[in-house]
Amino acid sequence: MSKVADERSNAAGSLAGERRAGISGSRFAASMAYFERAAKVIPGGIYGSKSPGFLVPGHFPYYLSRAQGSRIYDVDGNEFIDYLCGYGSQIVGYGNPAVDGPALEQARKGDLLNQPHPAMVELAERLVGLVDGMDWAVFVKNGTDATTLATSIARADTGKQIIVAAEGAYHGAANWCSTNVFPVFTQAEQRDVRFFPYNDVQALEALFAEHRGRIACIILTPYHHPTYKPQQMPTPEFIAAVERLCRAEGAYFIVDDIRANFRLDMHGSHRFFGAHPDLVTMGKALANGYPISVLLGRDSLRKTASSFFITGTYWMSAVPMIAALATLDEMERLGGAARLAALGGMLKEGLESLGREAGFCARVSGPLAIPYLTFDEDTDLYLNQRFCAAMADRGVFLHPHHNWFISLAHTEEDIARTLDAAREAFRELRQQARGADSSGG
Ligand SMILES: Cc1ncc(COP(=O)(O)O)c(C=O)c1O
């Protein structure tokens, strides 16, 4: 059984347990009622594994009804300081009027028209001027559309089949890259995808040597954010090796910047790490949650891109493009990546020292604006789950298995409140550990 299926069946099992324990009468009564109704009409109740409540039932809501700034509100009216930010899509805060104002105005005038709105031209010009080394842009809806298009264009241009990717990397939910697919898809659609351990120059060299003349591209996230594990930054030697091997092979280097997007650098995360990709994918925070992603590329791929069949019914809708232009302005106005890193630095420092005080080796990995906490002593993420559950009990929404995000709507006061909650949560964990020790558990 896949991990997702596992999580869902655990959730279903826990649901019965919770009903027995009377949790449906708790602070999540309305959430639980919706989940029971959903289970009858939506396979799994909520698709994907999009709820930390599947991992630690009873501590997280299943359904949210609204959000504002850095806060989310569930269907029972509970408020949380949110560090998931719509899986990274919120960068200037939920309901930011500087974005929603122009977006809603365009919605009233017309969103999905037969031909593109001029905002498409303006947004392409803006991104080409902003993102390091990129000469053209095409807009799609989901990140998965962008990564699929990037690898397809690289294959078409080179006439070669093989895509190289890092083990444990996430590039979307399509069958060519999804880590949760059934073997029947893996065999057919991942037949020409090869994986190597991130940052391992020797393994990468060996892979390129083994498949010489057959590699179309390598796709990498700007830093490694495998689920369930500490995040890893690239070494300069690794980036240099990727670029050297691509040049020698005539393969394209794709940076999948969908998750990090502008959180590290307004010119793209590749500028932050000193990399020089041929294609860059972005999405998520691009329009502060309005549905749009983009593939950017170098001149060398313009001809192939222009002969490509790039289309989708909703891909030209105007509202997300207007929202993207407004989001870029707002990010700059609110202090951009430097402000995010400052807030993330406060959070990292605070969490690590509070963890130490309580006797844990808690470590925050990854970029400051996109942190993820793990415990060195935690072999199966159980401590992570207990910690995030204790934080949710105190009104702070942290995902136990997925990295977190800071937004420009977070404030120093939010971080201070988060650290107050963390102090109590670490203490609670320590008491639980003592209790388990004294009962011989
Ligand atoms: C690095 C990366 N690539 C691609 C995707 C897929 O994006 P989407 O969910 O919009 O299809 C994601 C989504 O989490 C991502 O983090």
Image (cartoon, grey):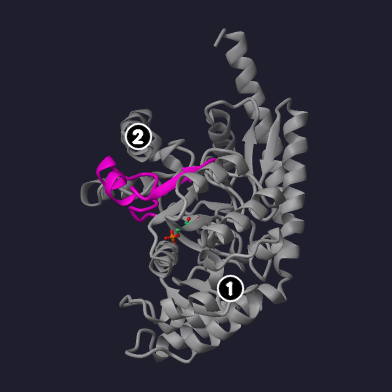
Q: Secondary structure at mark 2?
A: helix
- Secondary structure beneath label 1: loop
Residue 117 counted in the magenta span: no
Magenta stretch: includes residue 195: yes
Q: Is residue 14 left or right of residue 169?
A: left
Rounded to the nearest angstrom, the CA distance separating label 1 from label 2 is 37 Å
Res 416 visible: no
Question: Which segment did they paint magenta?
Answer: 173-197
Horizontal relation, residue 147 to residue 277: left or right: left
Q: Callout 2: 10 Å neighbours few (<14), some, many (20+)?
A: few
Residue 22 horizontal/vertical position (percent): 37, 32
Quadrant holding the N terminus:
top left
Q: Quadrant of residue 3?
A: top left
What's under tag 2, amino acid-wise?
A: Asp
Residue situated in front as seen by the camera: 231 or 137: 137
Examine the rendered structure and indicate whether residue 404 appears above or below residue 385: below
Residue on which the image places disc 1: 96
Q: Relative to residue 93, is residue 415 depicted above or below? A: above
The residue located at (50%, 67%) in the rendering is 283
Residue corresponding to mark 2: 6
Q: Could you tell me residue 63's position as x and y percent?
A: 40, 53
